[in-house]
Image (tube, rainbow, N blue to C red):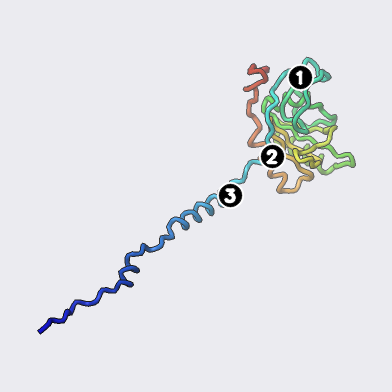
Amino acid sequence: MARTSTRPKSNSAGTEQASKPKRSYTGPIIGLIVIVALAALVFLDPPPPGVEFPSQGNFHLSAIEEPHAEYNSSPPSSGPHVGFLANWGPSEEALPPELFIHNLEDGGIVLAYNCPDGCDELQAGVDAIVTDVGAGTLSTPYENPIVDPDGNEYRAAAVAWTRVFYFDELTPEVESEVETFISLYRGIDNHVGATGGVSQN
């Protein structure tokens, strides 16, 4: 009498399913977390205000009228200048950049404005910031157009060594950015890295 096998038939389909690896979502989830974290970091810690320009050195001119290379920003934020400082504080007369650049080199901040049609409120606000902050800042009318690298014209700018923050009016938000700009760049000694590798005081 032949024996019948009681062994259960193998389920080849089930074996194939069992042998397939389960899909892991760990990698995409970690990637998403990293993207969200980076976005939050940028949002919570925005870049400092202003546009950065390459340094044009700190070559000292013998006089304000001495010819020199064209500046790479308007208002200028580095480059040839005379070897003495403009007075700190608000200035009613337009200070030439060949003068106030030395203030920038010494860690100062210049608030410049150019309003052909008049801007008494903006001027008063700029002067008030300089008066409140005190040492290491000055404000001045600027006789040339205030223009960013894209050719957009503005009525005012905060200038530090190799950095310019452009604005048209002093809204609370803009005023806060100007104050941040001042706190970041005022007091930095910029004599290192002079043209030709020689620092000129």
- Sort mark 2 into few (<14), some (14-19) or many (20+) by Cα contacts within 10 Å: many
Q: Is mark 3 on a helix, strand or loop?
A: helix
Which residue shows up at 36% across the image and 62% down it? 21
Which residue shows up at 26% across the image and 73% down it? 10
Mark 2 / mark 1, whichever is N-terminal:
2
Q: Residue 82 carries which label?
A: 1
Query: Disc 3 marks which amino acid?
Result: Leu
Relative image position of residue 115 (x, y in whole percent): 86, 39
Which residue shows up at 19% across the image and 77% down it? 7
- Sort mark 3 into few (<14), some (14-19) or many (20+) by Cα contacts within 10 Å: few
Mark 3 / mark 2, whichever is N-terminal:
3
* Residue 135 visible at all: no
Q: Which mark is residue 16?
A: none
Query: Disc 2 marks which amino acid?
Result: Gly
Relative image position of residue 71 (x, y in whole percent): 76, 28
> Separation of disc 3 and disc 2 at Cα?
18 Å
Q: Which residue lies under the disc numbered 2?
A: 50
Query: Disc 1 marks which amino acid?
Result: Val
Residue situated in front as seen by the camera: 19 or 23: 19
Relative image position of residue 175 (x, y in whole percent): 72, 44
Residue lying at the far bottom of the rendered structure: 1
Left or right, 105 with reference to 139? left
Quadrant where the N terminus sits is bottom left
Quadrant where the C terminus sits is top right
Q: Is mark 1 on a helix, strand or loop?
A: strand
Relative image position of residue 92 (x, y in whole percent): 84, 31
Mark 1 / mark 3, whichever is N-terminal:
3
Residue lying at the far top of the rendered structure: 62
Which residue shows up at 78% across the image and 45% down it? 169
Q: Quadrant of residue 152?
A: top right
Q: In this view, does 141 lie above or below 170?
A: above
Q: Residue 44 carries which label?
A: 3
